[in-house]
Image (tube, helix red, strand yellow):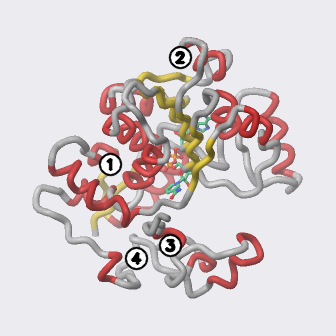
Amino acid sequence: MDFHQHAVCDTTNPNAAMQQPVLGYPTGGIYGYTHPFGGYQGSHAEYIRVPFGDVNCFPVPDGVSDEQALFLSDAVPTGYMGADFCDISPGDTVAVWGAGAVGLMAAASAKIMGAERVIVLDRFRDRLDLAEQKVGAETVDYTVADSVYETLRERTGGRGPDACIDAVGMEGHGTGVGQVYDKVKQALRMESDRATSLREAILACRKGGVVSVLGIYGLTDKFPMAALTNKSLTLRTSQQHGQRYMPQLFEHVTEGRLDPSWLMTHDLPLSESVRGYEMFKNKEDNCLRSVFRP
Ligand SMILES: NC(=O)c1ccc[n+]([C@@H]2O[C@H](COP(=O)([O-])OP(=O)(O)OC[C@H]3O[C@@H](n4cnc5c(N)ncnc54)[C@H](O)[C@@H]3O)[C@@H](O)[C@H]2O)c1
């Protein structure tokens, strides 16, 4: 049994009853993630209340800068967990959908864990460049590739990646008929998700492989259950269990294997936070993450 599933803690969510109709059993509290998740302030608040501070706070060790520590609270542990879910063996190929901060950290973590090849898919050239230059990953611009499945199949000797990580989520972008279908159903409020990347990851994964889902989904239509069962795939997913990974992540940073500070593309005063969020939301000016200084 795994005793380190902090995101599903039984005792930190005072609003647990609000989740029961949708989830069956509630999650733990999550900072800045609406009332059903506990109503805790997010980390842009002036003060945040940390329940069980002895477990949920970590002293930042010497040798870890503020800019590095900042990302160890979200994008890094999420990406790291996604790679950890893949049970990577030396020689493995891992494909990552989405080159946002989460996907880039999943790719970097897969390399740290021994993946021989990491292939990152996105449509933004600046993000794919970071995947190549900072992570040493191969990249695919899915708007140029005729078929993501065929491209990955060709690049893996006809077998498919050993593990596929979805770091996109319900606001996925697509190029084909599937995207039109999702957009129409969304507009009619008949589904909440545009799950292009999740469907592609399940289809592209090799037989017996792992699909690791970091992207957040709601009600997903056309979920390819047949491919999961018939290809004997393992599906793993969670909100990130940050506390579980923090000691390892501090070690990776202090020992020079990981430097997440380059995720900060925009270093802004707090007074410019609205502009910083807009740039992040609309992916303007090559914005990956905005950091605000009070
Ligand atoms: N599980 C967790 O604990 C956890 C924690 C943090 C974030 N998340 C989720 O992770 C996801 C990614 O977060 P982020 O901050 O990196 O977001 P982001 O929006 O910066 O990045 C998502 C990337 O996916 C790309 N994309 C869109 N459609 C695609 C497709 N069909 N194929 C390939 N790439 C595609 C976009 O171009 C974008 O670069 C979100 O769903 C977020 O909510 C989960």
Q: Which residue is mark 3?
A: 30
Tell me which label, 1 or 4, sits earlier in the chain: 4
Q: How far apart are the alpha carbons under marks 2 and 1? A: 33 Å
CA distance separating discs 2 and 4? 46 Å
The image quarter in which residue 294 lies: bottom left
Q: Secondary structure at mark 2?
A: loop
The answer to which of marks 3 and 2 sits earlier in the sequence is 3
Type of residue at label 2?
Thr
**For mark 4, what is the residue?**
45
Q: Which mark is residue 264?
A: 1
**Element type where label 4 sits in the image:** loop
What percent of the width, then of the height, locates residue 282?
Answer: 55, 46
Amino acid type, label 4:
Ala
- Give x and y (percent) for residue 259: 24, 45
277, 174: nearer the viewer: 174
Query: Circle 2 sits on which residue?
Result: 156
Examine the image and state in which quarter residue 106 appears.
top left
